Image: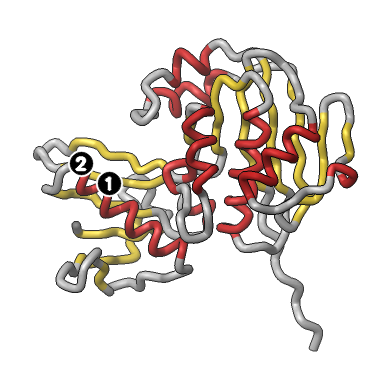
Amino acid sequence: MTEKSPQKRPMLLSVVALDTPSLPRHAEMLETLSILSGQCVNPDVVTARETTLAFPWGGSMAAVVLVPAPLPWSNLEGPCETAWWWPEARASMRGHNSHLLVALGNDDGDPIRRSLALTHLTAAAATHVHAAGIFWNGGGLVHDPQVFLAEARNASPTKLPLHLWIDFRIENNDDGTLRLFTTGMKALEKLEIEIPRSRHTAQELLDFAHATAHYLLARGAEIRDGHTVGCSEDEKVQAAHAPSMWDSTMTVLRLEY
């Protein structure tokens, strides 16, 4: 019997919104990429065109492509409005006039390794252009370029930059409780996390969801339906694989925290 080849994972994408249309100089970008990732990249392997840089990176082909037009505002308005971590998002992103598409080709690699590779590549590209903001496609988030770079400097398999990849959204319920849901876990091949109703503070909710997500992603762990999870031996939070409170056709990790 012939073994099936590993299934190819989809292309990973991010976008660097630009105030001035320009492609980074590849030698400078690769030097920054080497510093961020700790892996040397040979400039000789780069295929450079007027609007495109392409080279092998992170186990697959990478590309940085200059698009001399802004992203449609309809794609950015929602993420900018909900980016509580970056109050200036709307003002910074509204006037951009062009963008870089940063892509990592489809392969059978681990999603965490690939996301780290794209994070480092995005930060390296954004360092050498006039960046207005960064859009992380997997989670639908926007980021201040300087904050993104700072997070990328510290990113590693044991310290994942989850706030760059995942939107941990907290909202009020009508009864005075809070709810939390994530966007971006699915792109990392895990169930989205939802906490439908909680009496904890917003910071406690955020800390608990972040710790749970990091446990799942950094360790490659699973939380089974009906099991419990907690940040200490004494904490036992009930978990279930249940329909999303937003989309009954989607299964999420529901936590009764």
Q: Secondary structure at mark 1?
A: helix
Query: Disc 2 marks which amino acid?
Result: Ala
Residue 177 at x, y percent in the picture: 13, 42
Residue plotted at (75% across, 40% down): 30
Residue plotted at (68% across, 33% down): 125
Toward the top, the furthest residue is: 95
Colouring mode (rainbow / by chain / secondary structure / one colour): secondary structure
Q: Secondary structure at mark 2?
A: helix
Q: Nearer the viewer, residue 117 or 230?
A: 117
Query: Disc 1 marks which amino acid?
Result: Leu
Residue 38 at x, y percent in the picture: 65, 52
Give the image quarter of residue 180. Answer: top left
The quadrant of the image that shows the N terminus is: bottom right
Give the image quarter of residue 72. Answer: top right
Crowd rating for badge 2 (residues with CA inside 10 Å; few <14, some 14–19, many 20+): some
Residue plotted at (56% across, 19% down): 132
Q: Which residue is mark 1?
A: 206
Question: Circles 2 and 1: CB distance less than 8 Å?
Answer: yes
In the picture, the disc for residue 33 is none
The quadrant of the image that shows the C terminus is: bottom left
Residue plotted at (27% across, 73% down): 226
Toward the bottom, the furthest residue is: 1
Q: Which residue is mark 2?
A: 202
Q: Is residue 5 left or right of residue 113?
A: right
Q: Is residue 212 above or below residue 45?
A: below
